[in-house]
Amino acid sequence: MAELKPATDDRPSTDRIMWNDGERRVGDERLPIGEPAVEKHVRALIEDQLAQAMGRVFQVEERSRHLERLVAREPVSEHDIQSLTHSNAELRNQLQQLQSEHRLLLQSTAWRVGRRVRDLAQRYPAFARHARRAVKLAYWTLTLRLWSRIRVRQGAKKGIALLAQSLLFDAEWYCRRYAALLPPGTDPVVHYYWIGAAQGLDPHPLFSSSWYTSALPVEAAINPLVHYITHQGRSTPDPHPLFDTGFYLKQAGKIPADRTPLEDFLARPAGDAVRPNPVFDPVAYAEEYASKLKGGINPLLHYAAEGEAGGFWPHPLFDPAWYTARHPAAVEFGALAHYLREEKCAKGVACSEHMEQLGDKTLSLPFSLSFPEESDPEVSIIIPVYGHYYDTWRCLASVMLLTRKVTYEVIVADDRPSRPIASLLGAQGVVLVINTENLGFLGNSNAAARRARGRELMFLNNDTTVGENWLAPMLSVMKADPRVGVVGCKLLNGDGTVQEAGGIIYGTGWGDPFGKNDRADRGCYNYVRDVDVVTGACFLVRRHLFEEMGGFDGRYAPAFYEEFDLATSIRDAGYRVVYQPASRVRHHGSASYGTEMRDRQTLKNHATFCRKWQTLLATQPAPDTSGFLSRERPSPRGIILVIDDKVPEYDKHAGAVTLFQYLRLMRELGLRVIYAPQDGKPLEPYTTALQQLGIEVLHAPDRLDRWLRAYGLYVDFIWTARPDVTFPILSQLRRHTGAPILYYTHDLHYLREMRRYELEGSIWALQESQRLKPMELKIFDVVDHVLTPSREEKRDIFAEVPHANVTVVPPYLFGDTDLTDAPADFASRRDLIFVGGFDHTPNVDAAVWLGQEIMPLVWEKHPDSTLWIVGNVPPPNVQALASERVKVTGFVPELEPYFEKARVSVNPLRYGAGVKGKIVTSLQAGIPVVTTTCGNEGIQLADGEEALIADTSEDIAQAVIRLLDDEALCRTLIRSGAEVVRMRFSASRAREILRNVLGDALCPVCGSRPRQERHADGDWRLGLHCTNCGVDNRGAGVAQVLVVPWHRQRVNTVREALPYLRDLRIHEFGKDDAFRATLSGLAGYTCSEKVISGLFYEDGVIDLFLSPDGQVQDLPTLHRVLKPGGRYICAVMDQVDETAQSLRDAGFQATVHDIDMPDREGPSLRIIEAIRS
């Protein structure tokens, strides 16, 4: 960047106008300051122009220095620098032109003659003085101007006296500001009256001569300050752009008649709340910059004189440097003046980065803080403060403007009783807690929490500003899972980089903020995950937990390490600490404690923390552990990397639905999931949906190949799909991970294209089939496990690769449906529906065939039927089908409104492979299905019982007509279709298959890893399962069944289930101490005898009875003591079915669970779960 230079650097020194001993010197002539020199017209004109040019040069120098300061704080654009450089060049040219004219004048004959006269005057100064006066007197007399000159002199004396007495002429400031123009000994009042005002110099920081003069109705040769004072500031322009006279008088009311409004404002005592303009708050400014305002100086005076140039903010949301950089015209009178006078506080004009981040395009300064008053708020937002007015105001403003969908209250807890700021904020609806003594951050927070009325507590630092809809995502995590005790946000630096994305606590007791100073858009910072600790600057905690823990532990007073201790206490109680990246908060980092105190207190509290949590810290990672492992809590079943072509658009494609459902199921099983789309694009809103499930999405700027080299070693499983995605990276996956590879087919791509060739005769389809087949067969040969959606595909794979390890998995996962019959309005329905995404060519062919050949046959019998073609991106040949009888919708977010109109779902697929999602979805929605043999492939619906199957246009049309005419048949198909969904496409079946495929990674009791190998002398079911907690294999089976009700909350271990079990009355008998140690502290635990009669004196007192060592013999007593709906879970070695039947006979609903233990021969591990009716 070129250096900015004053425009007067190259000015010849001999031609300068200088001031010396109270005289003005031009060349060799000395003239008294007291009255203007009388010269020839031309010389006077040139001198006047030269003086004005020098004044402009001085102003440019001032602006240049101000801009240099701005550049030092915030870079100026190249365009601004070029514009200023051009302006400087123009002023230089004007000055040089005037100097040239002045040199010509000095060389003229008139000047040389006059110079001799001046030499005589210098030799005889008294004579010269009298002579000049005589000449002037004669001239004024002859021109009849004597009386006017006398009046001018009298007016000048009065004006100078008036200025000297006024508060609005600051002689000291004037001399300091214009030192370059006033040599020592110059009377500043006289100089301003005769010369300074004409040059636009200001007599006071809050009186702008040029501003005032330009605002007069007609410019006149008057002194602006004299004019303002003589009119008492009434009916005059504002004296300065920062002082709004009308606005001030409305607040101040009546003021003394002999005092101008500006003088009245300057005379007000410190702490007076009357404002000079709508934006500037003197009280707030004085509080924020108390250490800078010495001697009770007026805050606006300080800001105008040096505050703006020094980078001080006139308002919590007004940054002068930031504003000036975006409004170069603000240089003339200042940033705030420009906003007040030029922009007129217009809506949508941002004044700082903080204000821009609020995102409200209708916002303008000033605005007041006002919060809703809730009788039963969901959240109490607690903001501890100790000074820092501007930070606190900004924080409150962001909370007020950006909190959505949550009822809340705000508590400002002020811990500085000597000079509290809480009452100065002017925030309506805020609960103010002002301590009578300094309690420190910890004590202040605890005291405020006791005043809270919300169901949950949010602790928020006052040096933060929250992002859009920041609170609702944290609260939604807490509502979704009662095991969540604390939720933290993604904490950002002021520049938008990461400050903390969840915290890590090492075994040493020290911690690390994950992601510090990295870019915030990377996938590793944007998924929900369990962490050791969250930032203390902003976190949500369950109120009952906070109270049970006794608040922040007083041993850490006054501050530091309290959030580490609270998070660890909550985790130790069996609750989760969760990081929520959708909640974004910026932390601007002002400090209430000095660095020396922070370091000393941190060391002290670190030692306290280590003593308190010595046992737990032994299980924490070492400081040199990879951040990939330590950034989130260990996953119960390991780490799985999932790879497919792109982020699944689950509302557009059947394959995407399958992938999304299995990704969700993996999370429910406790797997840590990393999803890597081949295209690297974070498609929205689908990427966010995955991240909110706790799935890390690996997208640009990160790349899969680099990720594999860095972290592939830690992957336990790999799930991949599609030949064009999988085949190119097989070698990388093997080289960098060593993890078993699971390949999901979706369908057999080569077979689908071959069928297309056979139907259409497309050479391209044949070539594509020939290209894909060797790739797919190679994948089947190399991967560890092939997952396919249909038995037909399994058969085809075995035919090509006999040694392949193939498992059939349901491609679509639905919860248990209670559908038993058609809806009430079904008889009146006449419409048909076709569903399919049209980026899949078999769907295009089927839709065109249906519209052009099948539907005309249907309309012959049912002309009132409408066909709805629903699907993403329909091509032109599908759109061309649209008519009064055919509706082509394109993409729709929900299918339910269209299913509610439909009588029949028609899916005439002529080629393709795999299970057809559109058919399963129709069955699940309770719509009878007509399809082809190809469409039925993989589902194997019974023709006439579960669907109607036909393969020609005529037969398909007849099937549709049959369903339109036969309501009884429709109802039969609806009931049987619902049963198909329940039996073949349930989430519970898919969960069982996936658990068998992946196996167990962690102990289901304590969650530790690795576990003891499952072998023992004798029956393996009695062998040790986990060396950490000591549970045997039978106990592990009981634990798996125990946590089944909470699988959807991702509970996969007994330790994770503790919050759900806490309110239950539980009993267990046996010699296994694993459950006893894990469940210690829960109500009513345990007994060690198999005979339970006599142990309980009341009926219906037990919620849960665990029996890992065998069956309870006294079943009547068991039935008596269990509550209705109470559970009994036991591991039985022999006669399992007989035992289950005996439980049924005793009044229980008994279910036998076969627990998979891989690589086991002989008897299986079977667990009985009985529920008291």
Image: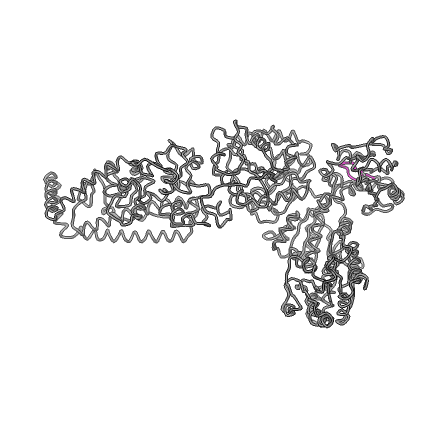
State left or right for residue 1092 relative to residue 359: right
Principal SS element in the magenta part?
Answer: loop
Residue 477 is a magenta residue: no
x%, y% of residue 1112?
86, 37
- Does residue 672 sit above or below 375 in this rendering? below
- Residue in the foreground of this view, choosing between 26 and 1092: 1092
x%, y% of residue 719?
71, 53
State which region is magenta: 1023-1031
Residue 1024 is a magenta residue: yes
Q: Residue at 32%, 35% (x, y): give it.
A: 256
Quadrant position of residue 567: top right
Residue 722: in sight, yes or no? no
- Does residue 1123 sit above or below 7 in this rendering? above
- Residue in the foreground of this view, choosing between 640 and 1105: 1105
Q: Residue at 63%, 47% (x, y): give it.
A: 527
Q: Residue at 15%, 42% (x, y): give it.
A: 150
